[in-house]
Each structure stands twice: as C-alpha cells, then as structure tokens.
Image: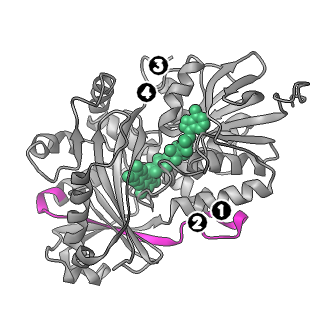
Amino acid sequence: MIPPDSDGLLCPIDVAIVGGGIIGLTQAHELLTRGFRVALFESELVCAGQASHANGGQISAESGSPWMSPVIRRELPRWLFDRHRPFSLDLFRMGSGAFPWLGSSLRNTSRRRYLANHGSLHALTRYSLGVWREYEAELGSPLVPGSGVLYLYRSHREWKAAQELLSWEGDLAIRAEVLDQDGCLRRVPHLQYAPIAPAGGFWYPDDHFGDCEAACRKLLDHALRKGVRLHLGETVHSIEPGSESVTLVTGCGCYRAEKVVIAAGVGSSALARSAGIRLPIYPVKGYTRTYSTSPLVCDGPALADQSRKVVLTPLGNRLRVAGMAEFAGFDDQPDLRFLRRIHDTASDWLPELRHVPSELDWACLRAMTPDGLPILGTAKAEAVVLNVGHGPLGWTLAAGSARIVADGIESRRSRNAIDPSPFRLARQRGVS
Ligand SMILES: Cc1cc2nc3c(=O)[nH]c(=O)nc-3n(C[C@H](O)[C@H](O)[C@H](O)COP(=O)(O)OP(=O)(O)OC[C@H]3O[C@@H](n4cnc5c(N)ncnc54)[C@H](O)[C@@H]3O)c2cc1C
C-alpha cells in the first residue's frame, strides 16, 4: 500500500478506476468486496451518463455472439440495397481509423475465427450471468429481473441460415429452442396482433434483461457504503506508469495508485495511448427509444428482431427498443432517420407502439473490438489494467469481466473461473 503524500494530492489508493459506467462500477464493487481501497474517476457529474445510460437492457447469456459472423459476410451484399439494413457507413465522418478496423473485423467473419471467438465469448457471457447472480445476493436487490428472450426471423431464408450457424456451434451446448411460427406465437401470444408473422425463431430461456442504469445506481450506492472515493466531474487526462505504481493526471492534480483500471468505454483508447498502449477499438453508434408504456409484460419475455437486429425489452412499465450500428467516428448525435427505423421495426411486432409517446430518444457509442471480445487484464505496464472493448454486450459481460480483472490484480483464480487468455490484449495481432 502506498502512504499518503505530503502535498495532499497524492492519496493512498490501491486501485484507481477510470470510468463510472457499468464496467467501472462492477469493477469497483468487485475490488471493494475484496478489501481494496478504490478511487473512481468519472468525467461527468453523474455515473452511467454514457453507454450504460439507456442501452438495450438484454443480458445475452446464451444468445450473445460476436457481430462478425459468416452470416454478416453472406448478408452484406443484400443489405447494401436494403433500406432497413441494420448498419450505416458515413464515409465522410467515419475517419481513416475505420478502414483498418473494418478490415480486421471482416477477417473475423471466417467460419474458423468466428467459432473460436464465439466459444470464448459464450464462456464469458455464461460466467458473467453467474457473477450477476452473486452480486444480486450481495446487494440484496434484483439487478436483472426479467428472463427469456424470443429471437424472431422475418424470412425462412434468414431463419434457416441461423439454424445452420447454431448447428456448427454444437460444442458450445447453447441452450436455445428452435420454434416455428406457431411456437413463436405460443411463446408470446401478443404477437398474434402483429401485422406481420415471424417465419420462425429461437427461444433463449437463460437470457435475461433489466435496466442497466438502475443497476449502476445500486452498485454506486453500495460502493459508497463500502468506502469508494468518488471523483465526479474529474477527467483523467493521462496515465504515467512507474516501476511500482502509476500516476493519474487530472484537471485537479495528480494521484498515485498501485494500479489503474481503464474502464472508460470509448474514451479508453485516448487514455491508454497516454500510457503507450494502442487499443484496437472503434466507436460504433447505436440508438434506443424508450416508450412510456410497454405492450409486453415486465417480467418477460423480451424480443429480438434478428432480421433487422433490433431488440425490444420491457423495463418495468416501459419498453426499450434498441438497434443500429452507425459508423460515423466519435459523433454521438442522434440521427432521426435511424430512430424512425428502429421505431418502425418495433411497431411491426407491437403495432400499438405507433400511439405510445417516446420518453427518451438516445444515441451512444459502443467501444467495439474487431473480434467482438473485450480486452481484460494488464497491458504493457503491469500497473495498467484494461477492462475495455465490450461493444454491444457490456451490460451482459460487466460482472464476469470485473471478476476476471480482479483475479488478475490479486494473482488468483476465483471458484469456477474461466480461462482469461482469449481476452488478453496480446491476442490482437500487431498490437504491442
Ligand atoms: C444502443 C446500445 C444498445 C446496447 N444494448 C445492450 C444490450 O442490450 N445488452 C448489453 O449487454 N449491452 C448493450 N449495449 C452495450 C453496453 O451498453 C456497453 O457495452 C456498456 O454500457 C459499456 O460500459 P462502459 O462502462 O465500458 O462504458 P460507459 O458506460 O460509456 O462508461 C464509460 C465512462 O467513462 C467515462 N470516461 C471516459 N473517459 C474518461 C476519462 N478520461 N476520465 C474520466 N472518465 C472518463 C465516461 O464519461 C463514461 O461515463 C448497448 C449499447 C448501445 C450503445
């Protein structure tokens, strides 16, 4: 442990965490529970103001898979001419960094790489659900109360392709039930009022859902009770690793800690660069609309339109609809066309949404890696630890990632721990 410095700015911190989203807050919870003295730095005046604020809410314990799959490669030419395509490339704003990132991502769409990436991701999504359950017990409060997600396909061709992909993944023993149209309607009878009918679907009983921002609030309350030192409105400008500690430079001064965990979402790349670490992360914008009432009952199931990559999640009395992958660099402003697109998709399944007011229209950036796996553990310098790159699955992966990172800091393995090696930064070719 490092003693307080005489000038008062250098404080006794075992671990400093940068970022007060779901990743930083679960990390704080995990480390405080293990007895570490933790300080958390957040640029904004509130926690969970960025990607963890109003996301799709689904805990994809079984259905979570890397976006870069053989299906993407096959569907890409068709999508280019489809006005409902789930992505948008803004060539003027996406920046030159997007091209190498897209190149590496497309390499991950081969069958061999996809299966390897999916195997690692599935181990982590499952593990994370177990850790979420432990956190619920520790906090004495439900964090992911809803269960069961029904994936819907609009065409037989897409449904068959998805079944083929699932059959390749037999070794993963994914818990999913293949449902024909009648099966989908039996599972969610409300779909009989939809103007369209699903060709078929998958039922994931072990997927869950809940409000990520509400979970952040509960984790923060608990962390404050456990003594976290919270630095709100304090941006960390740079990180300077030394031989036995690390210095954080903020607008208010300098802090020394034994270790720093970077958990700053899309802000992580700039921060890591200050410590000489290059992260293969690109910001991909997503959209959500929150309706003030929900036609789906609050405890489940939730829906996912897999043909258009839009999820529909009941959150208490409200409904959250999420989708789109827009490549427009660091621009995080919402584009009304894409909000309209996810609204139209959701209204195809739940037509009453056409008359329900939107409570919140929101856009935010996901920190994406080319292979769809987060980056966890120490980087070049031992004192700098990464918990970044969770892309579209940060809410799902937060608890498991926090445990893996804390195990690395303590050099021990928790009960039922999974192999952390697929999540190391070094897996990325050409990255030091
Ligand atoms: C539209 C959309 C839908 C999604 N749906 C789902 C879903 O259904 N299921 C799922 O599992 N995941 C989903 N996700 C992904 C999930 O929301 C993210 O992966 C997760 O919120 C990332 O958490 P984070 O803590 O890393 O980032 P953030 O929540 O963005 O937190 C990072 C924090 O770091 C702070 N920060 C940045 N730089 C600095 C600095 N230098 N100093 C101090 N503070 C700094 C920022 O202010 C921010 O508060 C979705 C994302 C989007 C955008």
The answer to whether residue 136 is magenta is: yes
Residue 123 visible somewhere in the drawing: no
The numbered mark at residue 77 is none
User: Percent position (x, y) of residue 77?
Assistant: 11, 40
Kindly state the secondary structure of the residue where label 1 is placed.
helix
Looking at the image, is 250 positioned above or below residue 226?
Answer: above
Find out if the beta carbon at label 1 lies less than 8 Å from the nearest ligand 1 atom: no
Magenta-tinted stretch: 133-158
| Residue at numbered disc 2 | 143
- Residue drawn at (37%, 33%), measured in percent from left and top? 370
Upstream in the sequence, badge 2 or badge 3?
2
User: Which residue is identified by label 4?
Assistant: 280
Tell me the number on the disc at residue 431: 3
- Are discs 3 and 4 less than 8 Å apart at CB? yes
Mark 2 touches mark 1? (CB < 8 Å): yes
- Label 2 CB less than 8 angstroms from ligand 1: no
Tell me where residue 354 sits by quadrant.
bottom left
| Nearer to us: label 3 or label 1 | 1
The kind of residue tagged 3 is Val
Whichever of labels 2 and 1 marks the residue nearer the N terminus, that label is 2
- In three-dimensional space, the C-alpha distance between marks 2 and 3, rounded to whole angstroms, equals 36 Å
Element type at mark 2: loop
Q: Nearer the viewer, mark 3 or mark 4?
A: 4
Image quadrant of residue 205? bottom left
Q: Residues within 10 Å of mark 2 (few under 14, many from 20)?
A: many
Identify residue type, mark 1: Lys
Can you identify the residue that label 1 sits on?
Answer: 218
